[in-house]
Image (tube, coloured by chain):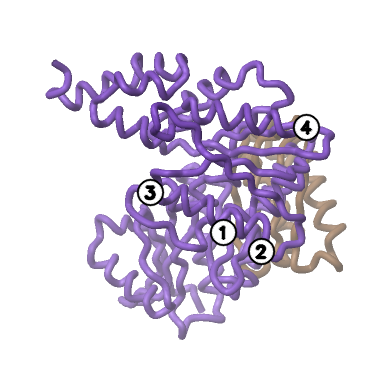
Chain colours: A purple, B brown
């Protein structure tokens, strides 16, 4: 039946007419056209647009089939098309957001459920050996102890505040696992952030430093985090990320406590901290609860130290005030690599 | 033959299968098979996939098969195509594949 459907890819930003048709089809299916989707595969029957599936890097979103075309093989063909297109773009490992009621359909397309906020949203991945393989590798890093701590930090960039949090958590635990957020969309590159954390925690006993993964604070697990400048984060966005942590990562490593600094400046991070209390400790889950330890931020001259404050000072052209907020290695990197960029972009402060 | 990059062959349509191959993370050959007819034919599908890989000389890599009730000949063809795409080499000894 779907043989007479023609499938092809469009860039919604460059095809306003088709973008409008996609928006209309999504609306019929109770979905919004999300920003950030660089490609849609659309299916056309004659002149009518009857199916669409969007791709935002390695995340499949906005999948819709016209109501009168459901039950045919159209949706399957559509999913095959988007999976092949994603591979052409270099993405074999895909994630997919959908409503929980559609999980069964996408399971038939090779996707496997990872986490669900009941009644709202489910995250799936297109491999049966994704998170299970990851957890198997993590479990090899397990350390014995009653109190196993974990910190997930972006360290954008690494400050005296991060240093304080790590040392305090390490002192309170039998072992501390420290992850650096891997997604490379922050102001400071992953390579630089990881190197700074590596230097900053050198000599802290009973600590393992880990590379982050797609399963923690990534574009897939927490899509809005990286666009926090744009506004408030929806309820479900933090939940998926936190459920992945509680259901998979914490059990793999035997994590009992997650440490986090209080957040005085950034609304997104503050909300993440608040949501953490619920999803890690209270929400129903097969996995044991993880105690959340929110550590009051350390201050410098009465001002709490925060990476977002360091970035603000850098943007505002006050490199001098940064020196007391960051360790020497971070300061050197800012001077060598990042500060000159700002001075070039802001000629008025270069004098 | 070595799998040096991620590759894909096939579709999710009924009577077909989708085969994904990727380089091995730890030098082992890992075979993951999912099928709508796993109970009746799971062992047979696994045997066909393993034999095809052996003929191609693939000894390491991750091979994921999503089967939708394909015949053995379709399974062989899709596995061959995915491996050849993932091997990044174009010299094909067809006699080994028949």
Q: Chain of mark 1?
A: A
Query: Mark 3 highlights which residue?
Result: A227
Q: Earlier in the sequence, mark 3 or mark 1?
A: 3
Q: Earlier in the sequence, mark 2 or mark 3?
A: 3
The residue nearer to you, when weighing A303 against A331, is A303
Q: Secondary structure at mark 2?
A: loop
Relative image position of residue B76 (x, y in whole percent): 72, 52
Looking at the rendering, in which quadrant would you find the C terminus of chain A?
top left
Q: Is residue A40 left or right of residue A87?
A: left
Q: How far is the residue under mark 3 from the one under mark 1?
A: 17 Å
Q: Chain of mark 2?
A: A
- Say whether marks 1 and 4 touch (CB < 8 Å): no
Q: Is residue A211 left or right of residue A81?
A: right
- Say whether marks 4 and 3 touch (CB < 8 Å): no
Q: Secondary structure at mark 4?
A: loop
Relative image position of residue A304 (x, y in whole percent): 43, 35
Q: Chain of mark 3?
A: A
Query: Mark 1 highlights which residue?
Result: A239
Relative image position of residue A61 (x, y in whole percent): 46, 61
Given this view, does label 4 or label 3 mark the residue nearer the observer? 4
Q: Chain of mark 4?
A: A
Q: Is residue A85 visible to us here?
A: no
Query: Mark 2 highlights which residue?
Result: A283
């Amino acid at each position: 039946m779907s043989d007479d459907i023609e499938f092809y890819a469009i860039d919604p930003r460059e095809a306003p007419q088709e973008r409008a048709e996609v928006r209309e089809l999504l609306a019929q299916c109770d979905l919004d056209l999300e920003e950030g989707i660089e490609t849609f595969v659309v299916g056309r029957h004659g002149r009518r647009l009857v199916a669409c599936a969007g791709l935002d890097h390695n995340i499949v979103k906005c999948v819709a089939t016209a109501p009168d075309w459901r039950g045919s093989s159209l949706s399957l063909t559509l999913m095959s098309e988007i999976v092949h297109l994603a591979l052409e773009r270099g993405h074999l490992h895909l994630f997919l957001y959908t409503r929980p009621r559609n999980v069964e359909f996408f399971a038939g397309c090779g996707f496997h459920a990872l986490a669900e906020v009941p009644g709202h949203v489910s995250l799936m991945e297109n491999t049966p050996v994704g998170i299970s393989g990851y957890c198997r590798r993590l479990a090899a890093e397990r350390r014995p102890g009653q109190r196993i701590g974990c910190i997930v930090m972006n360290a954008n960039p690494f400050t005296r505040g991060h240093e304080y949090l790590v040392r305090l958590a390490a002192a309170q635990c039998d072992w501390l696992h420290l992850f650096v957020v891997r997604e490379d969309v922050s102001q400071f590159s992953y390579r630089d952030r990881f190197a700074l954390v590596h230097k900053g925690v050198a000599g802290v006993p009973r600590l393992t430093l880990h590379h982050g993964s797609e399963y923690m604070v990534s574009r897939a697990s927490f899509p809005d985090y990286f666009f926090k400048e744009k506004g408030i984060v929806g309820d479900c966005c933090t939940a998926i990320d936190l459920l992945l942590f509680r259901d998979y990562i914490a059990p793999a490593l035997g994590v009992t406590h997650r440490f986090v600094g209080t957040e005085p400046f950034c609304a997104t991070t503050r909300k993440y901290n608040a949501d953490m209390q619920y999803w890690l400790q209270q929400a129903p889950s097969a996995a044991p609860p993880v105690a959340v330890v929110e550590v009051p931020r350390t201050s410098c001259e009465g001002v709490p130290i925060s990476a977002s404050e360091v970035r603000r000072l850098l943007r505002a052209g006050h490199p001098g005030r940064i020196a007391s907020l960051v360790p020497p290695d971070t300061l050197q990197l800012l001077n060598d690599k990042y500060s000159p960029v700002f001075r070039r972009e802001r000629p008025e402060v270069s004098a | 033959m070595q799998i040096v990059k991620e590759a894909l062959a096939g579709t999710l349509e009924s009577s077909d299968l989708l085969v994904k191959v990727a380089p091995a993370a730890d030098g082992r050959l890992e075979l993951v098979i999912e099928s709508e007819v796993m109970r009746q034919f799971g062992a047979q599908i696994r045997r066909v996939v393993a034999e095809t890989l052996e003929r191609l000389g693939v000894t390491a890599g991750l091979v994921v098969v999503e089967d939708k009730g394909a015949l053995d000949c379709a399974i062989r063809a899709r596995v061959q195509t995915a491996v050849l795409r993932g091997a990044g080499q174009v010299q094909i000894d067809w006699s080994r594949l028949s």
